[in-house]
Amino acid sequence: MSLNVIWMIPDQMKAGLIYGPKDVRIERVDTPRPSYNEVLIKVESVGICATDVKKYTGVSSCSFPIILGHEFSGSIVSLGEKVKGYKIGDRVSANPDMPCFQCKYCVQSKFNLCTQLSVIGYGTEEIEPINGAFAQFVRVPTWNLIPLEESIGYDEATFIEPFACVIRSFEQGKVKITDNIVILGEGRIGLLHIQLANVYGVNRITVTGMIDERLEIAKKLGASDVLNVQESDPLKFIFDITEDGVDVVFDTTGNAKAAEQGIKMLAPHGRFISFAGFPKGVKIEIDPRDLHYKEIILTGSFGYGSLSDYYKAGHLIANKRIDVSKLITKVRPLEELEVGFQEIAELKSIRTIIHPNS
Ligand SMILES: [Zn+2]
Ligand SMILES: [Zn+2]
């Protein structure tokens, strides 16, 4: 490491801190210093995730203040003393999860279910927040790094984390090429599900939503049918086009009514995957006879399945099997972070990307 590089890293950096619901402040804070096995990344691009917006709107909480931002990419500008295998200038993204490696789920390599899970750029009321990437620099342990292939741009690389979760979703759905699938929701995650369905080569992809403009994008990305649920009855539609329902339903809405309808759409042996989290206290009704007589499976998809999901995601994006560039609707400097949160909350942007160093 040249002294020159150390000298160029400022002692303080610009960061977007959230102090509580609707309270975002751009401040100067100390630039983090990487310890033994950590690197310092200059953040080139960071996407706003629905979970960030939930902290902003107050739907979910954590101990404030915190620098959010867990879907990021950038280049390494400083190395801890013991770092091996990475050098200054390497382009990277990251798996933001920091499991405890001790609980009973970690022992079984089910890291997404870790009972003490910490996440870079995220926090809950129970778990200590770790500062993330809505800042000029972020500190990341080497075992969290995902090296970027040459053909993937920084903005595209911000999709590696959410897309790894979509890969998990399909594995939970045990998707087969002959399957008819329904994707509830036409947001960024729903649209990523369409693109992965194309890679799988499923038989028919039906997408439901409420925003015509997004449903048009869904169609362009490969949806066989799109349906605005405010204008048409999705259950009637599904049973008009199929004999006895569909094989897999992915719920990317976290909406109780949509989920109840989605479960009713299932054919015998159908699988319902709850991708989006529901707000606390929400209840849904199901007909238990469907569990017995149709042997339907109800499950969820939370985070990623294994580290390889990140590499698969990076590779599918790098070789353009998944085209994420069409989903980027806004690019903003860090100073406009709050505007970014607002536009995602108000469904005015599918994907807002922040460039903290622009
Ligand atoms: Zn996310
Ligand atoms: Zn654990």
Image: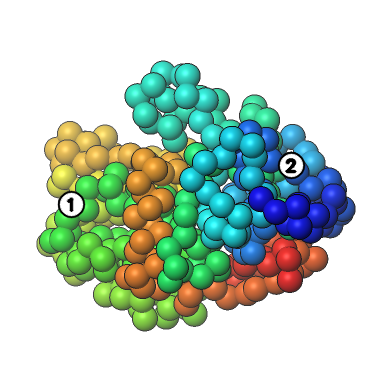
Q: Are marks 1 and 2 in contact (CB under 8 Å)?
A: no
Say what secondary structure mark 2 lies in. loop
Residue 108 vs residue 18: left or right? Answer: left
| Residue at (43% x, 71% y) in the render | 151
Image quadrant where residue 25 sits: bottom right
Say what secondary structure mark 1 lies in. strand
The residue type indicated by label 2 comes to: Arg
Quadrant in the picture for the C terminus:
bottom right
Foreground pick, 152 / 335:
152
* 311, above or below 293, in the image: below
Image quadrant where residue 5 sits: bottom right
Q: Which residue is mark 1?
A: 267
Q: Which mark is residue 33?
A: 2
| Residue at (39% x, 43% y) in the render | 307
Residue 120 is at least partly visible in this image: no
Foreground pick, 55 / 17:
17
User: Marks 1 and 2, Cα distance to the nearest angstrom?
Assistant: 54 Å
Q: Give how far across and how far down residue 338 sits, in percent.
A: 76, 62
Residue 344 vs residue 107: left or right? Answer: right
Image quadrant where residue 227 sits: bottom left
| Residue at (39% x, 67% y) in the render | 318
Q: Give how far across and how far down residue 265 sits, in percent.
A: 26, 55
The residue type indicated by label 1 comes to: Ala
Residue 79 vs residue 249: left or right? Answer: right
| Residue at (34% x, 64% y) in the render | 316
